[in-house]
């Protein structure tokens, strides 16, 4: 039997463990085997408790994917070829074929922003994260409301100012305490800019303001005056002009990977060509180039995908 002085000098940790490397488990009776055995039991109990409560990382991830990718049916308020307010639709970019989508769990860490990320997803099947509804813009003052055209129906018209509301099914089940989420854009600043292109940032925010207002326009600037007030047909090409920044919604070529796979960045930027054809056309018609607006490129053009119209 070892003497008391000998016992006090005994090492309860092996040399490997003292140097920072755990070489033995509780099954091996070397060093502090009893402590390792107890720690294994504590880890196992903690794992069982988290599994029963559904708080494991994999459980949270599966719940997140099930909420964001739950199938959603595209709906129509009327059986016609036009887009109505309240219709559940998708915004598909004509160049990439990707649809605008939100990521509710990828939120801005700044509490005052109350916003989450927006991207363009190649998962085109209608689900909670890539479906939206149009909401008419109502000014807060009567003077501003008198300057906007009024319509007697609930059909979306060219030249009308609207807000894009995220499907509430994408927010349900998350810890984000917002009632309604809308697309929102900012002017480029030191605190707000797109992550890859450094252009106007586009997010989905729970704060309602004029930064959420877009104007529905036709892609051809020469036809915008005559098309104002014309109902928008489902599948027709449109341009969403942000009213505050005066930049069109754009699906950039910058790709990145997230939990849903590879997606494209959505920003606010009006992409135009060099305009040589417009200069030549202006010289032929006598119109100065300062009065000739250039058409946006295909990255700014979207198609509203809705429920197909049933023809009797």
Image: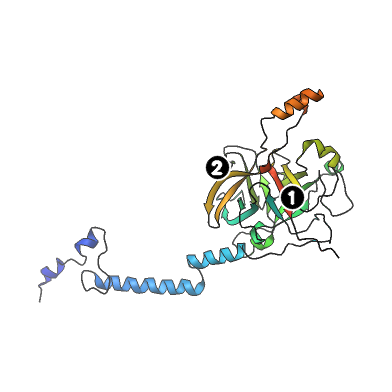
Looking at the rendered structure, the secondary structure element under dot 1 is strand
Rendering quarter of residue 295: top right
Are the two marked residues, 1 and 2, in contact with CB atoms closer than 8 angstroms? no
Q: Is residue 95 above or below residue 105?
A: above
Q: x%, y% of residue 117? A: 60, 51
Q: Which quadrant holds the C terminus?
A: bottom right
Most extreme residue toward the right is 152
Image-based side of 14 in relation to 168, left or right: left
Q: x%, y% of residue 169? A: 67, 63
Q: Is residue 298 visible?
A: yes
Residue count near mark 2 (Cα–Cα under 10 Å), binned few <14, some 14–19, many ≥20: some
Q: How is the image coloured?
A: rainbow
The numbered mark, 1 or 2, whose residue comes first in the sequence reads 1
108 or 152, which is in the foreground?
Answer: 152
Q: Which quadrant holds the N terminus?
A: bottom left
Image-based side of 224 in relation to 132, left or right: right
Task: Give how far apart the Cα atoms at labels 1 and 2 are.
Answer: 25 Å
Q: What residue lies at 23% left-to-right and 60% top-to-bottom?
A: 18
Residue count near mark 1 (Cα–Cα under 10 Å), binned few <14, some 14–19, many ≥20: many
Residue on which disc 2 sits? 196
Q: What residue lies at 52% left-to-right and 65% top-to-bottom?
A: 60
Looking at the rendered structure, the secondary structure element under dot 2 is loop
Residue on which disc 1 sits? 163
């Amino acid at each position: 039997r070892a003497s008391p002085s000998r016992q006090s000098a005994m090492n309860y940790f092996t040399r490997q463990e003292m140097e920072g490397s755990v070489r033995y488990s509780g099954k091996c009776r070397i060093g502090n085997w009893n402590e390792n055995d107890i720690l294994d039991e504590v880890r196992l109990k903690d794992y069982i408790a988290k599994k029963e409560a559904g708080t494991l990382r994999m459980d949270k991830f599966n719940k997140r994917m099930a909420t964001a990718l739950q199938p959603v049916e595209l709906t129509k308020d009327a059986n016609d070829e036009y887009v109505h307010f309240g219709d559940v639709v998708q915004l598909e970019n004509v160049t990439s074929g990707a649809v605008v989508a939100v990521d509710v769990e990828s939120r801005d860490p700044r509490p005052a922003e109350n916003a989450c990320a927006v991207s363009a997803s190649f998962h085109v099947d209608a689900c909670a994260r890539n479906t939206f509804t149009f909401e008419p813009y109502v000014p807060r003052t009567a003077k501003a409301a008198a300057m906007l055209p009024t319509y007697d129906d609930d059909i979306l018209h060219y030249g009308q100012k609207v807000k894009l509301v995220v499907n509430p099914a994408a927010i349900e089940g998350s810890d984000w305490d917002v009632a309604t989420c809308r697309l929102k854009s900012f002017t480029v600043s030191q605190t707000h800019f797109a992550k890859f292109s450094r252009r106007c940032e586009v997010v989905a925010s729970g704060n309602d303001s004029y930064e959420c207002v877009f104007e529905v326009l036709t892609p051809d600037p020469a036809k915008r005056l005559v098309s104002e007030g014309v109902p928008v047909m489902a599948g027709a090409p449109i341009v969403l002009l942000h009213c505050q920044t005066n930049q069109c919604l754009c699906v950039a070529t910058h790709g990145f990977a997230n939990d849903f796979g590879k997606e494209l960045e959505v920003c606010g930027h009006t992409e135009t060509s060099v305009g040589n054809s417009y200069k030549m056309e202006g010289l032929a018609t006598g119109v100065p180039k300062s009065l000739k607006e250039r058409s946006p490129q295909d990255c700014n053009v979207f198609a509203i995908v809705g429920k197909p119209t049933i023809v009797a």
